[in-house]
Amino acid sequence: MPNTVLVTREEPIAVVQINRPTVRNALNDEVMTELVAALQRLDDDEAIRCLVITGDEKAFCAGADIKDEFVKATAVSMLAGDLTSKWEAIRKIHTPIIAAVSGYALGGGCELAMICDVIVASETARFGQPEINLGIIPGAGGTQRLTRVAGKYVANEIILTGRFVKADEAKAIGLVAQVYPAASWLDDAKALARTIAEKPPIAARLATEAVDIAWSATLDAGLEFERKAFYLLFATEDKKEGVDAFVNKRKATFKGR
Ligand code: DAK
């Protein structure tokens, strides 16, 4: 494998780093293949309870590789290539994923961040959907997810101008949960991951699934899912542990059972 994705295990968390710094971590087929393989491996690993996807200081990811892939791509080759299956595979990861963004998160990079469960950013972060400058539009969910986050009028302005959104504005529009200092952004993101990793994994999984359903279903369907998931959690050992720890004034230890 070409090592375009690096994995660092720091149990109970793991950091998955896109590693093509010379092209601002642009996505090509190798990156997507390695990214999906790494995430699926970690998702199957009970010792890992929260994942961090990141790039480097300059770029989280500058989107699809324009020079490698877009120059030769045709409508027919892309249709036949089934590009979306790898993106769908990332969407199906159960372990909570934090996107830790420093520098550019553009095009498919911004879309990759938006597939994650939480986005946090260094104050240096710049988000954008600049596809319009290439004569195309976002193709991995940008028009849909950014609109659900920011609303029609803000999403259109960002997508039609292709401008870069700074970290503070990204926080103001609800794209980013926390903005961290440039000196500590990755450590801060990992600390958040460790906090999430201490929580009961089955509850965490069902919480993120329920939140995702709020994007795609009616309120009634979402409430129905939430209610059933809530009842299901009463069958877990972790619910007994959490309630017992509260009653006995001690710290809970969750096992994912
Ligand atoms: N692809 C290829 N190379 C890239 C790149 C990219 N996206 N971004 C940067 N690079 C390369 C540059 O060409 C340059 O290479 P050399 O000249 O050194 O050989 C090197 O990285 C450093 O870039 P710069 O010299 O430009 O560095 P700066 O720091 O000045 O600027 C920048 C960084 C990220 C602002 C700038 O490079 C830039 O604007 N890059 C393009 C960003 C962009 O337009 N992204 C959107 C691409 S379209 C889908 C899945 C995915 C997608 C669509 C559909 N399906 C599942 C259907 C995604 C589409 C996209 O992302």
Image (cartoon, rainbow, N blue to C red):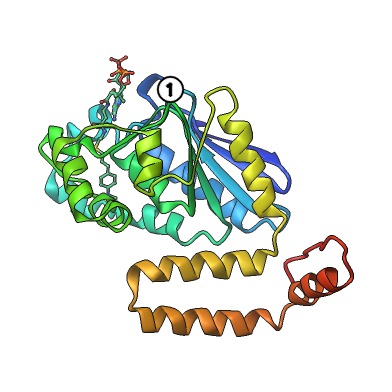
Is residue 34 shown left or right of residue 214?
right
Identified at 35% across, 38% down, the residue is 169
Is residue 237 shown left or right of residue 36?
right
Is residue 88 shown left or right of residue 183?
left
**Of 20 and 100, which appears nearest the observer?**
100
Quadrant (top left, top right, bottom left, bottom right) of the C terminus = bottom right
Residue on which the image places disc 1: 58
Asked whether residue 3 is in view, the answer is yes
Q: Give how far across and how far down residue 11 sits, in percent.
A: 73, 45
Instruction: Using the image, determine if residue 235 lies above or below residue 143.
Output: below
Q: Is mark 1 within 8 Å of ligand 1?
A: yes
**Of 130 and 180, which appears nearest the observer?**
180
Identified at 77% across, 70% down, the residue is 242
**Of 76 and 84, which appears nearest the observer?**
84
Instruction: Using the image, determine if residue 107 lies above or below residue 122.
Output: below
- Specify the quarter for ligand 1: top left
Q: Give how far across and how far down residue 188 sits, in percent.
A: 61, 36
Q: What amino acid type is highlighted by mark number 1?
A: Lys
